[in-house]
Image: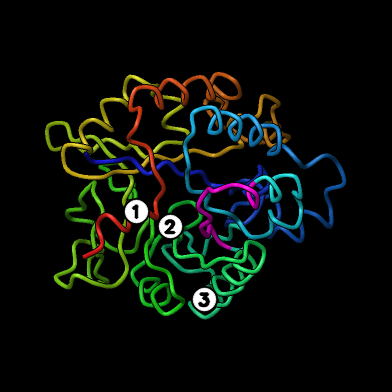
Amino acid sequence: MNKIALSFDLEDWYHTPVITGYTFSKYKNVNDFFNEYNNKYDFLTEGFIKLFELLERKKIIATFFIVADILERYPEIYNMLLNSNHEIACHSLNHQIPYNPQTKKFIQSQKEWEKELLTSKKIIEKRFSKEVIGYRAPGAFFFDWMIEILENAGFKYDSSIAFNSFYNKTNIKLLKIPSHPYYINSENLSISKNKYGLMELPWSYYKFNNIFLPGGGAFFFRALGVKYFKSVIKNCLKMGDTMFYIHPLEFTSERFPSHNHFKRPLYWVNKGDKALNMLEKLIDSFNGRWTTCNEIYLNNKL
């Protein structure tokens, strides 16, 4: 029976590109944010606790892709994860995105990116006293040169590629990306002829008349709803194992301050308890099929 990797990107609102880590961000980086911002910043804990309790109630073990600086600022979240059986994976040091899609230029060198990657991996492994083998790129910006660096750093799988007909967050023209796990090559980010190396756990998508509709989760899940995502996942499960993700931040009811200058009103659709209820319905629709990214990796390892 094919399964679904249930994963969560653990980050707070100040990690979103409009606030930090991107070319148009209000603050240059997380340090600049905390140097200037003296008001409440924790809009994560509320949603995380709701999610954690849901997973406990459903007896589901999932994967948490963690932005490493979270571990210092949210001791309650850290302790809850430390005493759980959930898989811990890496989502960068502080959610810095190394690329400007407007200019098509990198704003961070490969050496800088590698240094941050190794630092984040070291922090997470030290805090949890276990090896971290999974990575997800901030904003899903994933590039060919990352593959060798991730392999050399000891990562076994990545889960960043969001293949669809509407946007491409890589430096490669994606020709054919499956919805099931595969060993990735650095030439076109598609299936490698070699049955070893870094495994990709791509985001789910829905094929309709040669148009690939985005899946994965997060905002698209809140905007498009449970019925659409049930169809997405059912379609992907026919091909093999697949993946779904969302942010614990999305289960927080309170609007965080970025709404004052965040010109995307649809961002708030079905946020808070509505999103949590939607997730519970989706979980119930595929009872017994949810697992960790690590188990998906092991099941597809040759």
Magenta span of residues: 81-92
Circle 2 crowding by C-alpha within 10 Å: few under 14, some 14–19, many from 20 = some
Residue tagged 1: 161
Q: Look at the image and say whether residue 196 sits in the magenta stretch.
A: no
What is the C-alpha distance between the residues marked 1 and 2?
8 Å
Q: Of residues 14 and 165, which is closer to you in this image? A: 14
Three-letter code for the amino acid on which mark 3 is drawn? Glu
Quick one: label 1 or label 3, which is nearer the N terminus? 3
Q: Count how many numbered circles sit on residues in the image.
A: 3
Between 194 and 16, the one lying in front of the other is 194
The residue tagged 3 is 114
The answer to which quarter of the image holds residue 158 is bottom left
Mark 3 or mark 2, which is nearer to you?
3
**Alpha-carbon span between mark 3 and mark 2:** 15 Å
Q: Does 250 appear above or below 71?
A: above
Up-down: is 276 above or below 132?
above
Residue 147 position (above or below residue 63)? below
As shown in the figure, which amino acid type bears the numbered disc 1? Ile
Residue 59's x, y, as percent? 49, 33
Residue at image point 39% right, 25% down = 282
- Label 2, on which residue? 141
Task: Name the image quarter holding residue 2.
Answer: top left
Residue 141 location in percent, x, y?
43, 57
Q: Secondary structure beneath disc 2?
A: loop
- Give left or right: position of 77 versus 21: right
Q: Earlier in the sequence, mark 3 or mark 2?
A: 3
In this view, the mark in front (1 or 2): 1
